[in-house]
């Protein structure tokens, strides 16, 4: 499939007229019309409904548009990568990860790596979509908390605590860890049941034979932190603290609750060796960021 003609198709869909698209891509209008007709013949369906005042996408054209846009984006990315390789550096790496991981771990890591650091971009997605974004080719590697796909290489790069976050003057603020049995007596601010950290916490509570009733459930980790800082209760999150809150690990029967962080990459990627070195450095950074002060519970992927 000729990518040049796909660009013409996208241009017409954006401008709404053959004339406007022809001017934008600097091609004679009759030539552009002929090539679009040929594309429609090759595809086996009409892309546009043509009228004297302009064109509109058919249902098939609307369905095909994101496919064409994706192919063009991949072509641009491949071209940029090839230029970087030819220049000798392979270009900066793009990582797919959840927003919390980007904010609390990857962004500080990038700062420590300086101007020559390997990561230049991050795609922030929901935890359950991290690996699908990587598989789709929108990132060079991924850092996630779910079990990695078996068809790719992966390694554990560290562990992040599930914290109880409290005001500085709270009786639990100076504790090294907070036992689950003690924590569930507090008014708890937790994420909704759709969030992995909530599922992990609830599983630990159930295994300990305990129960609790949330004081507040929220979809926003930022709001959970704000509510805790406002004195509404103790929030349970894996995010780093804000608003002066103190973070304290949560003690289960077999250790402190922690989340496993995985690095995932493709051995066939042109920069696989650089990705592995990057993940090695990231692993060392995570170990310093969240030092192991007590025995961790069997750190598990977030479900």
Image (tube, helix red, strand yellow):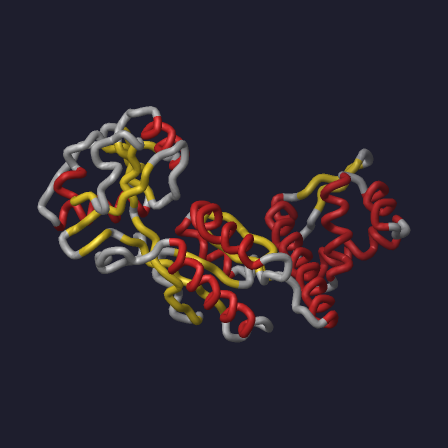
Q: Position of residue 188 (x, y in %)?
A: 23, 33
Q: Between residues 129 and 289, which one lies in front from this camera angle? A: 289
Residue 27 located left or right of residue 17: right
Q: Is 103 situated above or below 40?
A: above
Residue 283 image-quadrant placement: bottom left
Give percent across and percent down for residue 29: 88, 48
Q: At x 54% / y 74%, what residue is drawn?
A: 273
Residue placed at 14% from the left, 33% from the top? 185
* Front residue of 48 and 110: 110
Residue at image location 73% in from the left, 67% down from the top? 83
Of residues 147 and 16, which is closer to you in this image?
Answer: 147
Q: Quadrant of the N terminus?
A: bottom right
**How many numbered badges does the structure rendering display?**
0
Q: Position of residue 52 (x, y in %)?
A: 82, 36
Q: Is residue 58 left or right of residue 155?
A: right
Is 84 drawn above or below residue 214 in the view shown?
below
In the image, residue 13 lies at what x, y percent?
Answer: 72, 43
Of residue 56 and residue 116, the one placed in the foreground of this image is: 116
Tell me the residue at 77%/54% (across/down): 36
Q: Quadrant of residue 12?
A: top right
With 71 as the anchor, is 164 left or right in this view?
Answer: left
| Residue 255 found in image quarter | bottom left
In the orientation shown, which residue stands out farthest toward the left?
A: 209
């Amino acid at each position: 499939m000729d990518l040049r003609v796909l660009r013409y198709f996208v241009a017409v869909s954006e401008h709404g007229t053959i004339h406007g698209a022809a001017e934008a891509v600097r091609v004679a209008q009759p030539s552009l019309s002929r090539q679009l007709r040929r594309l429609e013949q090759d595809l086996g369906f009409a892309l546009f409904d043509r009228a004297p005042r302009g064109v509109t996408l058919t249902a098939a054209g609307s369905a095909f548009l994101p496919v064409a846009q994706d192919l063009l984006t991949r072509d641009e990315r491949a071209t940029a990568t090839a230029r970087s390789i030819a220049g000798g550096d392979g270009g900066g790496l793009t990582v797919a990860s959840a927003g919390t991981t980007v904010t609390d771990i990857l962004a500080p890591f990038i700062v420590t790596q300086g101007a020559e650091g390997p990561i230049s971009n991050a795609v922030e997605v929901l935890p359950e979509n991290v690996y699908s974004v990587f598989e789709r080719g929108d990132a060079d590697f991924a850092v996630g908390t779910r079990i990695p796909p078996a068809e790719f290489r992966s390694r554990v790069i560290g562990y992040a605590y599930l914290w109880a976050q409290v005001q500085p003057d709270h009786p639990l603020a100076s504790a090294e860890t907070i036992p689950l049995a003690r924590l569930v007596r507090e008014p708890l601010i937790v994420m909704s049941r759709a969030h992995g950290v909530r599922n992990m916490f609830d599983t630990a509570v159930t295994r300990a034979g305990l129960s609790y009733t949330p004081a507040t459930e929220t979809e926003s980790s930022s709001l959970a932190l704000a509510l805790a800082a406002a004195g509404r209760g103790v929030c349970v999150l894996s995010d780093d603290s804000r608003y002066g809150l103190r973070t304290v690990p949560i003690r289960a029967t077999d250790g402190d609750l922690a989340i496993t962080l995985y690095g995932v990459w493709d051995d066939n990627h042109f920069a696989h060796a650089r990705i592995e070195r990057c993940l090695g450095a990231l692993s060392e950074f995570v170990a310093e960021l969240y030092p192991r002060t007590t025995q961790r519970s069997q750190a598990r992927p977030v479900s």
